[in-house]
Image (spheres, rainbow, N blue to C red):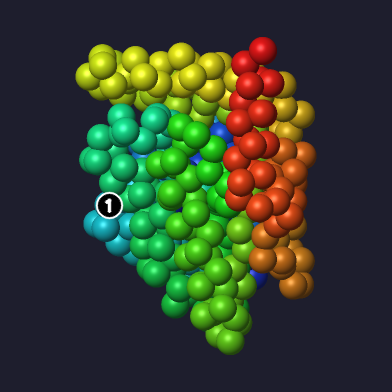
Amino acid sequence: MSAESKKVENGAKAVLVTGSSSGLGRAAALHLADLGYSVFAGVRTEDAASDLRQADASGLLRPVILDVTDASSIALAGKQIEEELDGAQFWAVVNNAGISVTMPLECVPIDVLRTQLETNLIGALAVTQRFLPLLRAAKGRIVNVSSGIGRIAPPYLGVYAASQFGKEGLSDSLRRELKPLGVSVSVIQPGAINTAIWDKMRTTADDLLAATPPAVADLYRKGFEGFLAANAARAAASHTRPEDFARTVASILETEKPKARYQVGLDSHSTAVAFRVLPDRLLDVVIAAGMKFTKQ
């Protein structure tokens, strides 16, 4: 425990939010702290921790160094959190940490696939396992952040979709296993929100395409470039904000009986409806038509 650490006040509800250095996780961590939660904000670097401390006006946010792909990092974070809880109630884990790889599947290096799954899927379960004893004691909440692509996989996002499909399935099983033990499990499916993730996706895509043999890369280049441009334009035009996501997280933690799934953004709601009502062949046609429309 660092010299700056202090105990959680008795009566306060403590929450862990992974992936809090930027984007949705940062918005959720700051919002929950403003609402009076003692927030353990998982970040990977001291610079990110310092930035969060400066942004926090509540005095209730506690950055914790946490790499969800590293078992020793999870163990150290767990020990720190338990020491700082000092018997206070540990109410929730928000599994938000994630990356997004976009690339034609033929061009995806297998080690990149492993990193995607380790971060978005395996890391979420590893963190959940570490904190389940505390959550059972509090009869608390697990919030798994998936995506509007958690049920429908468009072209060029197969690797990302695989991780989110997996998180959806994991969440369904967890919800059914933990309900008798008093712990609720909810999934949030955000749609397109203008955060730094889109720039990161583009940088990773450019690097991976450059490393792909030209004869293969050229098969996909035109369609893939159009897809990237359309994605960026859609995110920039979105009226959904990180604050909308943060408020949804808060509502899950505060409502008496949380739902299994929450959509954030009109596009996420539309995707959920399409998944329920359209057969696969018609869904393929709709997705292809949508891609042609956004390229124009």
Quarter residue 90 falls in: bottom right
Q: Considering only vertical position in the picture, is 276 above or below 264?
A: below
Q: Quick one: 269 or 16, which is closer to the camera?
A: 269
Residue, x 66% and y 28% (percent of image)? 289
Quick one: SS at disc 1?
loop
Quarter of the image with the C terminus is top right
**Can residue 130 be seen?**
yes
Quarter residue 257 falls in: bottom right
Image location (x, y in percent) of residue 35: 72, 51
Report the side of 268 relative to 102 (left or right).
right
Report the side of 178 relative to 156 (left or right).
right
Residue, x 36% and y 62% (percent of image)? 126
Image location (x, y in percent) of residue 247: 73, 48
Q: Quick one: 132 or 221, which is closer to the camera?
A: 221
Q: Quick one: 73 or 80, which is closer to the camera?
A: 73
Residue, x 61% and y 26% (percent of image)? 291
Residue, x 67% and y 36% (percent of image)? 286
Image location (x, y in percent) of residue 161: 48, 45
Local crowd size for mark 1, using a 10 Å CA cut-off: few (<14), some (14–19), many (≥20): few
Q: Quick one: 69 or 262, which is closer to the camera?
A: 262
Quarter of the image with the N terminus is bottom left
Q: Considering only vertical position in the picture, is 69 above or below 20?
A: below
The residue identified by callout 1 is 70
Image location (x, y in percent) of residue 283: 64, 44
- Three-letter code, disc 1: Asp
Report the side of 214 relative to 97 (left or right).
left
**Can residue 28 be seen?**
no
